[in-house]
Image (tube, grey):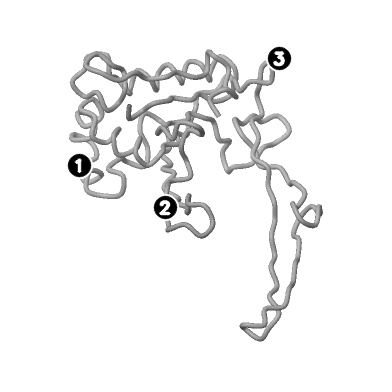
Amino acid sequence: DPGAYAPACRTLLTTGATGTSWASFASANSSPLKNLRDGRAAIIRTLQRPPNTLLLSDAAAQTLADHPEVKDVLKFTHGRAWLQGSGLPEELRGLNILVGSAVANAAPPGAPYNGDFLFLEPGTGHACAVLCYVPPGNTIGPRAVTSFAWFDAPDATTRQHGISLRHYRDERRKGTIVEAAITLDFRPIVVDSAGLITGAYLIRGCTL
């Protein structure tokens, strides 16, 4: 949610011939590497550590890989990366690349299947990118910091923490179905006095 980020920790790219969007290849103002530098500086100011992870919507990853600024870097260093996956290397400018390509059925119950990506900006459906810091080993020690963390949350049905078990009878299958589920809450760790995220940086409208 863009509204969850502090103003200094988010940017909205623009479209058009002079736009800043990553899809505006012909525009001199389109510079994904500058966007990454700006995000890096914003995170260092709060976490005192540079970001090491870049989360990308699927469309944002494809557009970033096609951007001339990035292609000019990769063609001399990661030639085969263009032919695989998103077209990006596993790491770019010290950032581990993660692409959110999970798809879910966005259609209402009973309607025809309508697959859509899960990692999109809510409300607008725009492709986006998030710079953040993940501690080594994905573990937070007593003196460590991180941009986001998972917390154990109560199950929506049983209100239990940890693993919740449910079972019900399915006559069509002539058996009892047993489900095991765990509920986790994904939360930002570093926020300002208004509760807005300052430990990560959101780039909006990557493909406008």
Where is residue 13 shown, x and y percent of the image?
37, 20
Report the quarter where the N terminus lies.
top right
- Mark 2, Cα crowd under 10 Å, few <14 / some 14-19 / many 20+, is few
Q: Residue visible at 23% across and 36% down?
A: 77
Question: How many residues crowd around disc 3 within 10 Å: few (fewer than 14), some, or many (20 or more)?
Answer: few
User: At label 2, which amino acid type do we have?
Assistant: Gly
Q: Given contact means CB atoms under 8 Å apart, are the residues at marks 1 and 3 in contact?
A: no
x, y percent for residue 139: 64, 41
- What is the x, y in percent for residue 46? 59, 17
Mark 3 and mark 2: span between their CA atoms? Answer: 39 Å
199 left or right, relative to 206: right
- Give the residue at mark 3: 193
Find residue 35 and report its image quarter: top left
* Residue nearest the viewer, comparing 67 with 93: 67
**Label 2 belongs to which residue?**
115
Give me the C-alpha separation between circle 1 and circle 3: 45 Å
Q: Residue at x 43, y 58 (%)?
A: 112
Q: Give the amino acid type for the residue marked by disc 3 in the picture.
A: Ser
Residue named by callout 1: 79
Disc 1 on helix, strand or loop? Answer: helix
Q: Is residue 33 above or below residue 95?
A: above
- Mark 2 or 1, nearer chain start: 1
Image quadrant in which the C terminus is located: top left
Badge 1: few (under 14), some or many (20 or more) residues near its Cα, within 10 Å? some
Q: Return the disc, 3 or 2, that comes first in the chain's sequence.
A: 2
Assign a secondary structure to mark 3.
loop
Residue at left offset 74%, top offset 59%: 163
Q: Residue at x 77, y 49 (%)?
A: 154
| Side of 111 where 147 appears, left or right | right
Is residue 161 positioned above or below 144 on the image? below
Q: Amino acid at mark 1?
A: Gly
Element carrying mark 2: strand
